[in-house]
Image (cartoon, grey):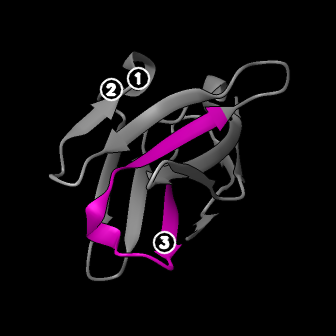
């Protein structure tokens, strides 16, 4: 199983970015995908999760601004991030667990300037 995150970049406060997590090597429909983020010196924080049934969970700080979705045909999970704030600056990672094994994609840097 491989996860490839992309779509990060530099954006001004109030702007938008869309992150993608491409999943290969397994049956995509069978498990949840989670986006985490991490800043230096802090623990990794759950940002959003989407289940196999498309149920979603968000950390309070991004509710109403971020939307997680999945495209089962393309094996991709998206994180649409709107109204970005400087405090959203972090490295974003996608994650899943398959048969008890954790899989992490390489992070993608999101930087929001004020």
Q: Is residue 91 above or below residue 52?
A: above
**Between 81 and 3, which is closer to the camera in this rendering?**
3
Percent x, y for residue 71?
28, 71
**Element at badge 3?**
strand
The residue wearing badge 1 is 59
**Between 92 and 106, which is closer to the camera in this rendering?**
106
Q: Which one is in front in this view, the residue at disc 2 or the one at disc 3?
A: 3
Is 108 part of what is drawn in magenta? no
Q: Is residue 28 above or below residue 104?
A: below
Which residue is painted at 29% across and 56% down in the image? Answer: 69
Quarter that holds the N terminus = bottom right
Around disc 3, counting alpha carbons within 10 Å, would you say few (fewer than 14), some (14 to 19), or many (20 or more)?
many
Residue 106 in which image quadrant: bottom right
Are the two marked residues, 2 and 1, in contact with CB atoms closer than 8 angstroms?
A: yes
Tell which residue pokes out farthest to the front in this image: 99
Residue 40 located left or right of residue 92 = right
The residue wearing badge 2 is 63
Tag on residue 23? 3
Task: Write down the region rendered in magenta.
Answer: 17-37
**Element at badge 1?**
loop
């Amino acid at each position: 199983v491989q996860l490839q995150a992309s779509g990060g970049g530099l954006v001004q406060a109030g702007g938008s970015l869309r992150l993608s997590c491409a999943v290969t090597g397994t049956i995509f429909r069978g498990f949840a995908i989670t986006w985490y983020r991490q800043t230096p010196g802090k623990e990794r924080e759950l940002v959003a999760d989407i289940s196999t049934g498309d149920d979603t969970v968000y950390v309070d700080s991004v509710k109403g601004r971020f939307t997680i979705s999945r495209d089962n045909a393309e094996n991709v999970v998206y994180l649409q991030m709107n109204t970005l704030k400087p405090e959203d600056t972090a490295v974003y990672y996608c994650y899943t667990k398959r048969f008890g094994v954790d899989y992490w994609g390489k992070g993608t840097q999101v930087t929001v300037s004020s």
